[in-house]
Amino acid sequence: MKITDDINAIAARKAAMAFHTRQSIKSLNEITPHSLTWADLNGIEKDARKEAVAVLERTEGGTDEQRQSAELAIEGFSALLEAIRSEKDERTFVGSKEPRAQAETSEQLSKRPSLGAVDVRNHGDDEQAGDICHALKPEQRFSTWARAQSHTDNELRGLSLGAYLRSMMLGGKTDVERRALSEGSDSAGGYTVPDVLSATLIDLARAASVVVRAGAQTVPLTSDNLNYAKLLTDPVPAWRLEAGNVAESDPTFGLVPLVPRSLAVQVKVSAELMEDSINLATALPNALAASMAVELDRVALLGTGTAPEPRGVANTSGIGTFAQDAVIAGYGNLSTARTAILTANQAPTAYVMHPRDEGTFVDLVDANGNPLGVPTRIAEIPMLTTTSIPIDGGSGSDESTIFAGNFARLMVGIRSDIRVEVLKTSAYASNLQYTLLAHMRADVAVTHPGAFYTLTGVGQAA
């Protein structure tokens, strides 16, 4: 993928030969942001900004031709800086600063057909198929899907989620804010956040979610009754003689429902902070998203399945499990979990555990006090951490659970519409604090129980 047009790249080379020499390139289009390290991205970004300023300074007071050439060069550098910014945003979204294998962003990938996508069909009472929704992989954005479904995206152009939340409390300052508030208000005094803006909050929550980073797929729920097929038993092929009969072997399917359940969170914000803070429009959506992500992770892993709570991995029938009931002394039980998942013809994508347990693995030493080596096959599987897993369970009140699995077999269904209310509770009268209450609907489901394994009773090391 080219950084900029050839005419801009040529102008940039003529105007900033020193930059090209420092970066060992002949053209800006030789730079491939997706393949660079995070440090290199920052280095090139800093150098490009400095060189763009230098180009302007060198051409100040020059001829019209020199200024036009400088403008083309600046356009090239601007395109480079934008490409680097987009790459850094992409890595922040997927939760990894490491170089990527392909130049396409998650938004671009979401627009192409994906062999890994799951068709989720909406079945009514007559059991006829309705709309088809594709499960989104972790690198694909919910907001891209929402824009494709929305007829109001252009009307809301330029309006951010943070600005919309601020306008709910302070009133709309622009025409687009006032129009969005008017269209989103309801008789109960709350606001339904436009789907395109809701999707931004959902993407923030997904980026903060450990199960999503582990590989869980997100299903946009378009109704309150969505089912998808789960393969219960595989068809069995058989060898045959020439012109012989073909053995029949029918696969067995079951339905897995996704029923949106209510998840709510409230945040208190002072009137002064709302009016005076220059970064609250970013900080507030991040705070809401982070709190939702922690709870989504908890129910995805440990949800009881007793209404109104969804059923998580640990309480799904058919998963593998081993009662460790001991402190962490080595990697043997992680290997046991890996083997069980491979035996189910699945490939584990992550181990998920509490930070305390991850720290215990890091601190393991051999008999001589040297760091204990991690078996190669175990080291290939990422260890992810979340404080959503409690560490105060078991007979000793200090035990936790470690989850291993192919998390692509975990579906997180989310309705795109999020309702937000601004409440003036007693906190407003006493402290001038608004209460912002956000309400979303979601569910989780395991499509292949054999793809998961838990280690229970994991105790704290002495």
Image: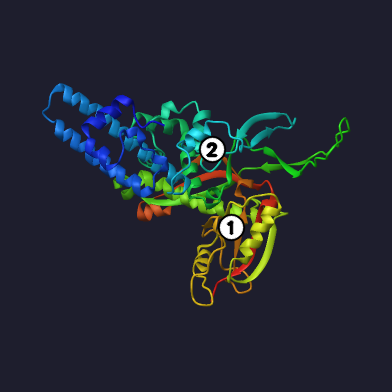
Which mark, residue 127?
Answer: none
Cβ–Cβ below 8 Å for labels 1 and 2? no
Q: Nearer the viewer, residue 404 or 169?
A: 404
Using the rendered view, name the quadrant where residue 85 is placed. Answer: top left
Element on which disc 1 rests: helix
- Which residue is pictured at 55% across the width and 72% down the height? 460
Of circles 1 and 2, the one toward us is 1
Q: Position of residue 397 (x, y in %)?
A: 59, 72
For label 2, the crowd category at 10 Å Cα-Cα, with few meaning under 14, some 14 to 19 and many 20 or more, is many
- Which residue is pictured at 38% across the width and 34% down the height? 159
Q: Is residue 193 visible?
A: no
**Which color mode does the image show?**
rainbow
Which mark, residue 416?
Answer: 2
- Which residue is pictured at 32% across the width and 46% down the height? 42
Q: Position of residue 408 (x, y in %)?
A: 61, 46
Say whether disc 1 or disc 2 marks the residue closer to the N-terminus: 1
Amino acid bearing label 2: Ser
Element on which disc 2 rests: loop
Amino acid bearing label 1: Arg
Q: Residue furthest front?
A: 242
Which mark, residue 377?
Answer: 1
Q: CA distance from mark 1 to mark 2?
A: 39 Å
Q: Is residue 25 above or below residue 438?
A: above
Left or right of residue 354, residue 125 in this image: right
Quadrant where the N terminus is found in the figure: top left
Q: Nearer the viewer, residue 206 or 172?
A: 206
- Which residue is pictured at 49% across the width and 31% down the height? 147
Q: Is residue 288 visible?
A: yes
Q: Nearer the viewer, residue 256 or 318?
A: 318
Q: Position of residue 418 (x, y in %)?
A: 51, 40
